[in-house]
């Protein structure tokens, strides 16, 4: 992994976490009816009965189909995803490490916009070199 890949990974991860924290820490933000709206993103244990932490990328593709978007750092986004238990709706964000699911999160449109912006910025930096 080269230095630009590490920078991109760092920028994307930071954007995801910062947007989630910023949304939850705003003092002027009204009380949210659900944790997703309150925090911008929430970790989920599974996406359906077959996709959980440790699931191989090929299995995710077989069970959930093609993602709505694939970011340059390998993160997959599934728009209009709903949890089975809580009924929360958002974009499913799946991050992989060594070909297996490392993190699953449900994110709001604002958090996904931050992820996409970080992805676009990293691409511009890479292209400028």
Image (spheres, rainbow, N blue to C red):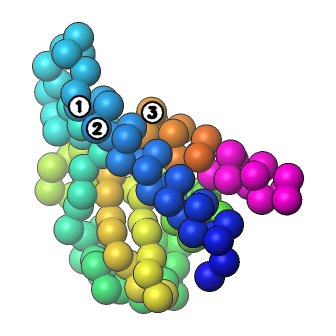
Residue 123 lies, in percent from the top left, at: 74, 55
First of labels 1, 3 by sequence position: 1
Q: Is residue 80 visible?
A: no
Residue 66 against residue 63 in the figure, above or below = above
Mark 1 Cα shell of 10 Å, populated few (<14), some (14-19), many (≥20): some
On the rendered structure, is 125 left or right of 53? Answer: right
On the rendered structure, is 21 left or right of 31? Answer: right
Residue 123 against residue 38 in the figure, above or below = below
On the rendered structure, is 27 left or right of 52? Answer: left
Closer to the camera in the image, 102 or 63: 102
Residue located 77% across and 59% down the image: 126
CB under 8 Å between discs 3 and 2: no
Query: Circle 3 is placed at which residue position?
Result: 110
Q: Quadrant of residue 21?
A: top left
**Closer to viewer: mark 1 or mark 3:** 1
Residue 38 lies, in percent from the top left, at: 21, 31
Query: Circle 2 is placed at which residue position?
Result: 21
Confirm whether the magenta stretch covers residue 121.
Answer: yes
Rounded to the nearest angstrom, the CA distance separating label 2 from label 1 is 5 Å
Residue located 37% across and 41% down the image: 18
Query: Circle 1 is placed at which residue position?
Result: 24
Q: Quadrant of residue 54?
A: bottom left
First of labels 3, 2 by sequence position: 2
Which quarter of the rendered picture does the C terminus lie within? bottom right
Q: Is residue 71 visible?
A: yes
CB under 8 Å between discs 2 and 1: yes
Q: How many marks?
A: 3
Question: Which residues, given as a range, are shown in magenta?
Answer: 119-129
What residue occupies the far top of the structure in this picture? 28
Which structural element holds mark 1? helix
């Amino acid at each position: 992994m080269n230095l630009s890949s590490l920078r991109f990974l760092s920028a994307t991860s930071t954007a995801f976490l910062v947007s989630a924290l910023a949304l939850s820490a705003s003092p002027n933000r009204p009380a949210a009816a659900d944790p997703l709206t309150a925090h911008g993103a929430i970790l989920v244990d599974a996406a359906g009965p077959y996709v959980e932490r440790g699931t191989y990328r090929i299995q995710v593709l077989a069970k959930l189909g093609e993602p709505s978007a694939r970011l340059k750092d390998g993160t997959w986004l599934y728009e209009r995803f709903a949890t089975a238990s809580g009924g929360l709706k958002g974009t499913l964000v799946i991050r992989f490490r060594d070909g297996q699911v490392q993190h699953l999160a449900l994110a709001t449109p604002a958090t996904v916009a931050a992820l996409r912006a970080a992805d676009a910025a990293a691409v511009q930096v890479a292209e400028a070199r």
